[in-house]
């Protein structure tokens, strides 16, 4: 489904600020894989996400989706089949437009936008049905401007908007990090449901090790622009946070920067 | 006074088309586009030179729209592909257009007084309908002594402007229109929803300037001349119309906002007409007045809001104080 081959990126090459953001990244996701990525700040998680979404072009390497080379495709073209939820709850929705208009924009993601009404009666029904699955009562507020919603509601809406055209790849970029614990738990729950129901191929970045263990069937640990540890299936299920920390120490010969990551 | 007001409404309805264009860039795209000062003249110049060269006035007006659209697209290109700041891109285009407009006209002013324009054609058709007599009869019955020479321009322009408004409303509700609105609201989001923001911005600024050029073409034909300086301060007038309209009529929905912009343009013209009747106001003062109107319209709501907030807090405090005393 998603194939990353030998991806390397260096920022500010040849200057004192030179930084190897990614070095020889190889990652292969099969259809339906749900991979969580952990790592401290500067490990290259966001750079990796941006490379997949098309925000950044790698210096070398290939990005293949369904066997198709997309590495030179700009972001807006890739986003026809890649969905992304950002960390900032404000980033995924348009505040001065209504809920139904936001959904209509998301609905047009994998089609060519045309000169026809974005919100039709038929679509409204569908939007309402999909909003009901969030259990937030948003289905009764189709005409409310999104700017009036709370951060949690907006993030739930972003998640729905990103997933309801069934993208080939779903990118979740620390999408619960900016929410309070109960809202974060709600979004995590919704994520689990949506991914399970639609069998989406998902890549999730998180700072929360417990979350990384709870969700998904594969886990990837990154450090200094490299993938240093991978675990999947049964082996992942038995893992605890302490095991991850020990693993990091064994590989790197140093303590995990625990002050930078949420352990619990 | 009645006649003056009549003229104000008449030209206000035409300027409303320009204001709708300004609304598209300033409010919908969040793109402060200063091309307007130039593209307004481009519209007038292209229409005038075409008419003088024997092109039928309606076709000449369509040429004007095309020229404005093109100018706007170039500004959009400068901004999106050239990565030039929006304000600067507009200023550059406006400056370039000054020379281009002079080239188009070949002289600073073109007279259309002896030419057939959209309005002279309209008057010929209108003459036989008898609408003027009926409406003027009504005015005489109401006690007016001086009567407008024709209602043709007012009524037909109103129909055209409202049509443009309705088309704009529809456009902004289509899938493409929604994406266009999202550019001004959350560009990053709509890009992540597979919209080509560059192309949409270019087309959006193009359409905006097409409308502005249409207004320029109509004003030139109504006034009987095109002048290379007729666009000076046009952007501020457009802005004044948008802001006045929004303040008076609200912006709850797109349809409401566009009607507000039209209302704002007409009211702006009326304000100008009233102001010019004072002896100490000279025609040249108008730009200063326009700037002052915009500044006032921008600042007043903030002052009013701050006042209200202060009052509310004072009241709360007083209540608490009284409570404490009572207890």
Image (cartoon, helix red, strand yellow):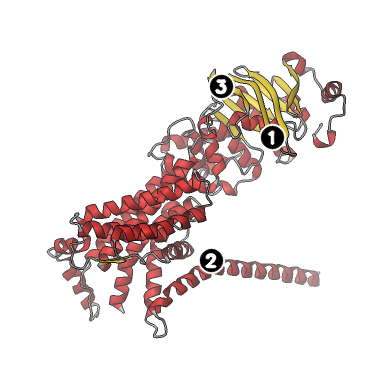
Q: Measured from the top left, where is residue A230 in percent x and y?
A: 74, 19
Q: Are marks 3 and 2 in contact (CB under 8 Å)?
A: no
Chain under callout 1: A
Query: Helix, strand or loop at disc 1?
Result: loop
Tell me: A62 left or right of B258: right
- Asked if labels 3 and 1 share a chain, the reply is yes
Quadrant in which the N terminus of chain B appears: bottom left
Give the Cα distance between marks 2 and 1: 47 Å
Q: Measured from the top left, where is residue B276 in percent x and y?
A: 38, 79
Query: Helix, strand or loop at disc 2?
Result: helix
Mark 1, residue position? A13
User: Which quadrant would residue A18 be assigned to in this image?
Assistant: top right
Mark 3, residue position? A65
Residue B252 in view, yes or no: no
Chain under callout 2: B
Query: In this view of the protein, which residue sits in the foreground, B48 or A180?
Result: B48
Q: Which of marks 3 and 1 is nearer the N terminus?
A: 1
Tell me: A239 left or right of A189: right
Quadrant in which the C terminus of chain B appears: bottom right
């Amino acid at each position: 489904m998603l194939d990353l081959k030998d991806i390397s990126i260096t920022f500010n090459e040849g200057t004192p600020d030179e930084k190897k953001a990614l070095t020889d990244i190889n990652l292969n996701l099969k259809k339906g894989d749900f991979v969580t990525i952990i790592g401290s700040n500067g490990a290259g998680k966001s750079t990796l996400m941006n490379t997949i979404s098309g925000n950044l072009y790698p210096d070398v390497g290939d990005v293949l989706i369904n066997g198709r080379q997309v590495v030179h495709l700009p972001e807006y073209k890739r986003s026809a089949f890649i969905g992304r939820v950002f960390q900032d709850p404000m980033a995924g929705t348009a505040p001065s437009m209504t809920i139904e208009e936001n959904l209509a924009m998301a609905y047009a993601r994998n089609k060519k936008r045309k000169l026809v009404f974005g919100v039709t009666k038929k679509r409204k029904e569908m939007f309402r049905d999909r909003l009901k699955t969030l259990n937030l009562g948003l289905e009764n507020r189709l005409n409310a401007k999104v700017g009036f919603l709370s951060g949690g509601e907006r993030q739930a809406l972003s998640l729905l908007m990103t997933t309801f055209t069934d993208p080939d790849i779903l990118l979740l970029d620390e999408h619960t990090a900016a929410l309070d614990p109960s809202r974060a738990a709600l979004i995590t729950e919704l994520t689990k449901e949506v991914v399970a129901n639609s069998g989406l191929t998902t890549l999730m970045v998180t700072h929360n090790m417990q979350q990384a263990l709870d969700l998904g069937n594969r886990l990837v640990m990154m450090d200094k622009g490299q993938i240093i540890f991978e675990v999947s299936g049964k082996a992942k299920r038995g893992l605890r946070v302490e095991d991850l920390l020990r693993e990091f120490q064994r590989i790197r010969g140093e303590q995990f920067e625990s002050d930078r990551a949420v352990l619990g | 006074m009645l006649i003056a007001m009549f003229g104000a409404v008449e030209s206000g309805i035409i300027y409303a088309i320009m204001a709708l264009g300004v609304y598209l860039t300033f409010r919908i795209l969040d793109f402060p586009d200063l091309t307007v000062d130039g593209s307004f003249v481009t519209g007038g110049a292209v229409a005038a030179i075409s008419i003088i060269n024997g092109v039928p006035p309606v076709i000449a007006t369509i040429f004007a729209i095309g020229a404005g659209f093109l100018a706007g697209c170039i500004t959009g290109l400068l901004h999106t592909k050239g990565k030039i700041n929006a304000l600067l891109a507009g200023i550059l285009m406006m400056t370039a257009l000054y020379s281009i407009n002079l080239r188009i006209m070949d002289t600073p002013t073109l007279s259309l007084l002896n030419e057939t324009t959209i309005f002279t054609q309209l008057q010929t058709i209108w003459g036989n309908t008898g609408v003027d007599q009926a409406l003027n009869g009504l005015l005489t019955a109401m006690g007016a002594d001086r009567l407008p020479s024709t209602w043709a321009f007012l009524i037909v322009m109103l129909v055209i402007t409202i049509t443009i408004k309705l088309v704009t409303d529809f456009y902004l509700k289509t899938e493409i229109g929604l994406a266009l609105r999202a550019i001004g609201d959350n560009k990053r989001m709509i890009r992540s929803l597979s919209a080509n923001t560059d192309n949409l911005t270019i087309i959006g600024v193009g359409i905006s300037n097409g409308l502005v050029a249409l207004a320029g073409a109509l004003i030139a034909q109504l006034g009987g001349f095109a002048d290379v300086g007729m666009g000076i301060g046009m952007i501020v007038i457009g802005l004044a119309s948008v802001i006045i309209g929004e303040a008076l009529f609200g912006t709850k929905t797109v349809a409401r906002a566009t009607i507000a912009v039209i209302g704002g343009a007409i009211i702006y013209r009326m304000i100008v007409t009233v102001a010019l009747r004072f002896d100490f106001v000279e025609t040249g003062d108008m730009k200063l007045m326009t700037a002052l109107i915009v500044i006032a319209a921008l600042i007043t709501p903030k002052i009013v809001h701050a006042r209200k907030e202060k009052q509310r807090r004072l009241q709360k405090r007083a209540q608490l104080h009284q409570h404490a005393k009572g207890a």
